[in-house]
Structures are given as C-alpha cells and as structure tokens.
Image (cartoon, coloured by chain):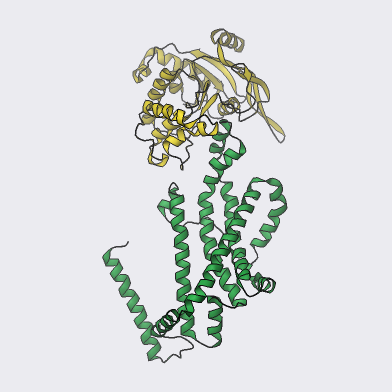
Chain colours: A green, B yellow
Amino acid sequence: MRNPRNVALGIVLFVIIMGVWEAGVRLLAVPMFILPAPSAVFVALYRGVSSGLYITHLKITFIATVLGFALGSALAFALGIAIALNRTVEYYLYPYVVMFQSLPKIALAPLVVVWFGLGLPSKVINAALVAFFPLMVNTIVGLRSAEEDRVNLMRSLKAIEGQIFWMLRLPSALPFIMAGLEVAMVFALIGAIVAEFIGAEAGLGMLIQSMNFTMDVSGQFSVLLILSVVGLILNRAIVAIRRRVLFWDVSVKANSGAAPIKGESV
Amino acid sequence: MGQPAVIAAARERAAPAVIAVSHLTKRYDSGREAIVALENIDFAVGDGQFVAVVGPSGCGKSTLLKILAGLLPATQGEAVLRGTPIDGPRRDIGVVFQSPVLFPWRSVLDNVLLPVDVQSLGRERKIVTAMELLALVGLKGFERRYPWELSGGMQQRVAIIRSLIHDPALLLMDEPFGALDAMTRETMNLELQRIWMESRKTVLFITHSIPEAVFLADRVLVMTPRPGRIMDMLDIDIARPRTLDVMTTPEFGTCVKRIRACFNATGGIDG
C-alpha cells in the first residue's frame, strides 16, 4: 500500500479537501462561529501550542487517561480472572456484570464528579469505569478459550491447576486480553474527556467546554485535532505491545484489527 | 474366534505385561438410556510391544485411550500399569493426540520440553535428550522455530518426541496420523516404526486404518461398536524393519482381510 505514488496521491487528496473547505468557507462567507476555515484552525492550533496553554491541559488529560486506563485494566483483569476461574464468584457477580454492561457508563459521569470533585480523581475514576468492561469481558472469554485438547494434554501430564493456568490458559487468553486493552485505551480517553465536560478545573475537555461558551469554534477544532492525535498515539502504543506479545498469533500477523468484542458500549 | 479364547491367548502371550486391562466397561448415562461405550475390554500389552487397536469411528477406541490416560474414569473394571491401577493422570504415560496440540507461543524445543517443565524434571539435563530426539526425527536445526513454521508432518513428529521426553513406560497414541495426507501418513508410519525400534517403548496405537494397524503393530486388537468390544486379536508376524512393500505381500493381505471380515460381520465398514 505504502509506495511513493500512493503517498503522493494521499497528499494531493488532503490538499484538495483543505482547498475546497477553505474556498467554500470564504466564498459562502460562513460565519467563524459555525465553521472556521482550515487556516483559522491552524492559526488557533499554533497560538494554543506556542503559548503553552494546550500543553498544560493536554498533560492533565493525558495523565488522567493513562491512570484511568491502568486502574480500570488492573481491576478488570483481576475480576475477569476471578470470574473465569471460580464458579462461586461467577454465580454471585456475573448478574451485576451483565446489568452494568448494558448501561452506558458515561451516564454515571455526573455522579462521579459529584462524589470525587473537580480534580484528577474524578477523571481517573470515570476513565477507569469506562475502560473496565471491555477488558473484563475479554479476559473472561479469553481464559475460557483454551482448546480442550490442550487442556487434556496438560492434564495427561499430571499438571496441577496452577500450571494449567500459567502455561496454557493465560497465554491462550492473551489475544483477547490485548484486544480488550486496545479498546480500553480508547475508552479511557473518552471517559476522561467526558468527566472534564461535566466539571473540571483543567484539561482538554474543559478547554473545549469553555471555548464553546465563548464561541471559539476554530479553537475547538484545534483541540479536537490534538485529541485525535493523542488517541492515535495511545492506540499505536498498545498495538505495538500487542505485536510484540502476540508474535505467535496468526490473526495478528494477518491483520492488526479483529478485536473479539461485540456490543460494547461506552 | 470366541471371546474366552481371545482372552486366554492374551494372558498367555503378554507376560510380563506393562499394562493389563481387565473387564473394563464405560457407560454414559444420558437421560433415559445408557450408552455403553466400552464393554468388558480385556487385554494386556507386554514390555516393548507395539499393539494397535483398530475399529470404525464411534467404537469407543478414543474412550479407551482417555481412560488409560487417566483423563476419564471407567465405570467398571480396571487398567493396571506396572502394578498400580490407573485412577488418574500419571507421569509414566506419554500421550500423542490426533492433532499435534503444540503451543504456538513455545518454540519447538520448548514444546518438546513441556512435560519437563510440568513435572520439574530439570531442564538443563533434559535439553540434551530433547536435542537427541529432535535429531532422531530429522528436526535438527528446527529447535528455535515455532510450530506454525512447520508442516503438519513435522508438527506431529514434535508431538511424538514430546511424549517420549519424560521417558514414560507406556506410549498412548490416538490416531496420530489421521489428519495427515496419505503420502505424509506413509512416511510417518515408517518414521514411527524407526523411532519405536530405537526406543523400544511399549505402545498402544489407536487407528481406524486397517493397513496402518497391520503395518505398525506386533498385535492388532479389533474393536466393534455399540457396545465397544474387542472382537478379535491377531499377531502380525511380519519381520522388521518393515518397508512399505510389505503392504503388497500375501501375508499382509491375509491379515487385512481377516480384520475387515470382522467389521463386515458386524456391519461396520471403515478404513
């Protein structure tokens, strides 16, 4: 796919889209507070970055996202293992899991902000809450995915349950766990931003909100641009880890997508 | 041939037995009717003997193997391996399944060493054995590769030497070449004969291919389904090492015919 000709065509296409957008906005005299021209967005981006304003807020959102991701993933992993391996835990906890799964976790954000305030904790918890479910569900499915023949082989060697877990079930679950982490990373960013929308002292989400009040639409566009770049970088980081961990998984080599997740909602 | 005569012959010839199976029965109670998978199985395998169990699909031969591997409890009767009844998985048994069952995240060498890791037999010491076994099956130089880089035949060879690494007293093989193409299968039969002649393991080999059973075994047990029973037993007195040419000899043909007649009589034709 990536040969010089395609790269050139891609650049040409980008320039055309930007040109049409710029020309359209200018010719039709679209007001700045409805749709800014790309040039205005880049000016806003430059101003925001060079003044250090965006960087300050970006740091806050980034830290909240990463901490929320770590917290949510750790809990999801632990609870996923407990549910997958223990019938009693599954019996008592799984009904709640199913109930929560169909609930849009974002709807809890106002409560989280009320409970944990306008600082870092509420963002981290909200991010963790949203990131939690896809990974937990995938951990459960993954740990149960070990092929029966392989389990029989381990048993025939007189392996104890702990050995079967470490040598077979956990490695078998890794493709599912890595796919869960990939989704959890994106979800954590959404969770952090939403918490900042609801109420926060700082962060890119809060910045978007305050720009909205002042009708600084080109500013909002420039922050969205930053957010998509942050999301992309976080996702690429997980994909890189996944490639390394799952060097043996055929589906990773065939295509980098294919996350075994169905019906997950934020 | 009647059942009692078969049993008597088995007792007399198989001494000293590594494994003795007596009155082994397996019933599955599913709802209203019970399914009898195995009924009164009696046989013994002598030290270093290669015994094949041949039968059509669904005759209970895989159930028999699972019971002997300690993966499934018997309903009645028992199997005694080297003096102790089999009541669960044991360290002195090696199993080869129909598919290679290799772990893709382990290299070829690590796959071979899986029993060593599970049973804490000392990796350093066993690596030497593993390398020798890899050389024995022509996989020298492949130890750092991964299973998905190997052909089906090579994968099954890895599975076979994995079952030998912990030096088991009994090797159980459950249609190990069933998933391979005909050409590879013949090569693997020759290979297995060679490995067996070098290691002199006691082998119980399950298959639904009559020629494969006759080619490989010292003795063939013929199983028929519903309920799974041993109908006939015959010793194959063809000299070793056998080449693929023995398959065209009259001796070989006679054995194949006799086994097939057994299936025809019970209405189950396969292989």
Q: Is B46 situated above or below B57?
A: above
Q: Is A121 situated above or below A83?
A: below
Q: Say left or right for B18 vs B133.
A: right
Q: Residue at x 48, y 87 (%)?
A: A34
Locate residue B146, reporting x and y percent.
41, 40
Q: Determine the image quadrant of residue A94.
A: bottom right
Does the rendering let one see residue A159? Answer: yes
Locate residue B58, reporting x and y percent.
56, 29
- The front one of B250 and A107 is A107
Q: Residue at x 38, y 90 (%)?
A: A26
- The front one of A255 and A117 is A117
Does the rendering let one see residue A266? Answer: no
- The front one of A126 and B123 is B123
Q: Is A27 situated above or below B176?
A: below
Q: Say left or right for B264 vs A38.
A: right
Q: Residue at x 54, y 72 (%)?
A: A60
Locate residue A175, reporting x and y percent.
50, 51
Q: Residue at x 53, y 80 (%)?
A: A208
Locate residue B111, reporting x and y percent.
46, 35
Image quadrant where one finds the N terminus of chain B: top right
